[in-house]
Amino acid sequence: MMAAETPTRAHAARLREPSDSRANVTGAQAASDRVASGSAKNRPRDRAATEAAIVSAAERLLLAGGWSGLNVNTLAAEAGVDRKLIYRYFEGVEGVVERLAGRLDLWLGETLAAQPPIQATSYRDFAREMLTGYLRALRASPLMLRLVAWELSEDTPLLRRMEASRSAVLQRWTASRRPNLPLPEGVDVVALNVVFLAAVQHLALAATTRDRFAGVTLDDTGWARIEAAIDRMLSAYPE
């Protein structure tokens, strides 16, 4: 199993830090704010550039330490800005994460759309190309896998919105790529797709923390074996 972080309700509360707690800044935090404010004064007053710097800082923090180390103070320090700007431009850390997730959704849509057109002559062939395409996209984005792991570890309105948005990208992609094929009869297509999607997602997550899973080395040869196994499993769909 993937080595998971252990998020708490306290972390979710930190992301939504209320205004009265914002004022209760420790001496160390105040000093950090002054340093950030000083560096911010040396920058041109460009809101778009500042927002981009904050979002990029969130990406670096998530990749380096996951969601447990992401809060308004670490984000302000990493971006080199006054923490007040995070509230002014994004209404808090949640707004930054949502902006970052939206950027990832755009990347996912473009990455999937760039794949070669599907030449499927059966729903089984179509499902194979969809699953392997999604698996390859996940493997290409460690940041997306970080967010997927977060969604699996907590249940908040923000994370539900992020999951729904990514699901919408996948649904649009499959709708645009699916040939004029009838759904297989006699099988629960939706349930099968859920199982297959969960399997490829979990394997992609596992590869971020280890080089083997259940006896299969997750290198190029191992991934080829996994894609071949997906092909065999799709025999559940009739031709």
Image (tube, rainbow, N blue to C red):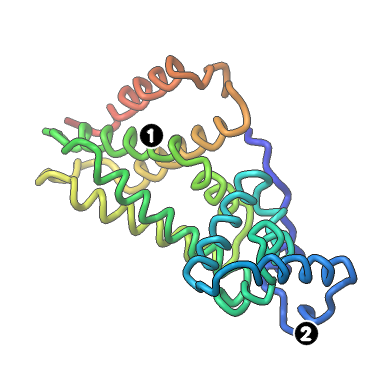
Q: State the SS at label 1.
A: helix
Q: Quadrant of residue 131?
A: top left
- Type of amino acid at the residue the image marks with label 2: Asp
Which residue does the image show at 32% across and 44% down from the upper left? 111
Which residue does the image show at 57% across and 24% down from the upper left? 213
The residue identified by callout 2 is: 20
CA neighbours of label 2 inside 10 A, class few (<14), some (14 to 19), many (20+): few
Which residue does the image show at 28% across and 27% down from the upper left? 235
CA neighbours of label 1 inside 10 A, class few (<14), some (14 to 19), many (20+): some
Q: Position of residue 101 (x, y in %)?
A: 48, 58
Q: State the SS at label 2.
A: helix
The C terminus sits in image quarter: top left
Left or right of 93? Residue 36 is: right
**Residue at the bottom extreme of this rendering:** 20
The residue identified by callout 1 is: 136
Q: Position of residue 147 (x, y in %)?
A: 54, 51
Q: Between tags 1 and 2, which lies in front?
A: 2
Q: Position of residue 120 (x, y in %)?
A: 15, 34
Which one is in front, 123 or 24? 24
The N terminus sits in image quarter: top right
Considering only vertical position in the picture, is 51 above or below 221? Answer: below
- Type of amino acid at the residue the image marks with label 1: Arg
Which residue does the image show at 67% across and 68% down from the upper left? 15
Mark 1 touches mark 2? (CB < 8 Å): no
Q: How many marks?
A: 2
Which one is in front, 27 or 90? 27
Which one is in front, 172 or 56? 56
The alpha-carbon separation of the residues under discs 1 and 2 comes to 45 Å
| Lower sequence index among marks 1 and 2 | 2
Give me the disc on residue 151. none
Q: Quadrant of residue 80?
A: bottom right
Left or right of 13? Residue 138 is: left
